Image: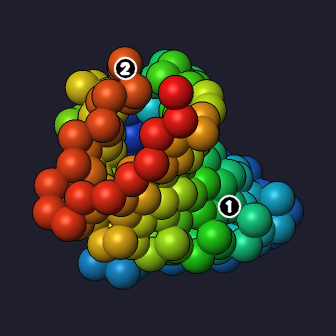
Amino acid sequence: MVKLFLFFALVQIAHGDTFSFKADRMLGTQAAGKEMTVLIGHAEVRTDALFLRADRIEIQGQNNEFIECSGNVTGQEDEREISFQTDHLQYNRQTSITRMEGNSVLEDKRNGVVAKARFIEYDQESEVSILQVGVRLFKNEMVCRSEHAIYRRAENMLNLSGFPVVYRQHDEFRADRIQVNLENDSVTMQGSVAGSIQN
């Protein structure tokens, strides 16, 4: 087991990215084209950009490109101040795309945003998140709900569709499509616009 761990670490250092893992139990094979490591029980994986914990973590690919986590999945990107939890996660280290399925929560601590959905896809490089099914996003006293949303973290912009509604303190906004500027809480609505505002 120790030799296998050192093999993984050395391969990733050669590619310019440190990679380490630990768990209660480990299974795996290094057969060419079928490289796979399964971590079971208190499993952890750490790369330069990401830290993951889960009941079970499966790592595949010659250079450990594909990581799949299940059971009590949590993770964080300390540099970007992002954390998340989900039932099931897939991470592609080549594309830097994370996909979360099940009860999923993404917290952007830098912007004070918490997003919840049944499916979340997060692109680390573009800092764009796609959220689907039962979407809820919270920031300060604002609550946004819809069936589909795109959160552009760098611009602090949120696009909602699929029966979107935005609650801001005592105000309520409904439309076919809603765009929210999370920097200043301004709301732009398109199609079948309705709402109520309390002065």
Q: Residue at x 20, y 66 (%)?
A: 192
Q: Where residue 183 is drawn, which disc sits there?
A: 2
Q: Dot 1 corresponds to which residue? A: 73
Pointer 2 or 1: first along the chain = 1
Q: Quadrant of residue 188?
A: top left
Q: Secondary structure at mark 1?
A: strand
Check disc 1 and give the amino acid type. Answer: Val
Position of residue 49 relative to residue 1, above or below, is: above
Question: Which quarter of the rendering shows the N terminus?
Answer: bottom right
User: x%, y% of residue 150?
Assistant: 28, 52
The answer to whether 82 appears left or right of 149 in the picture is right
Position of residue 52 relative to residue 135, above or below, is: above
User: x%, y% of residue 83?
Assistant: 60, 39
Considering depth in this image, is 2 or 129 the residue closer to the camera?
Answer: 129
User: x%, y% of residue 76?
Assistant: 59, 38
User: x%, y% of residue 110?
Assistant: 51, 20
CA gap, disc 2 and disc 1: 30 Å
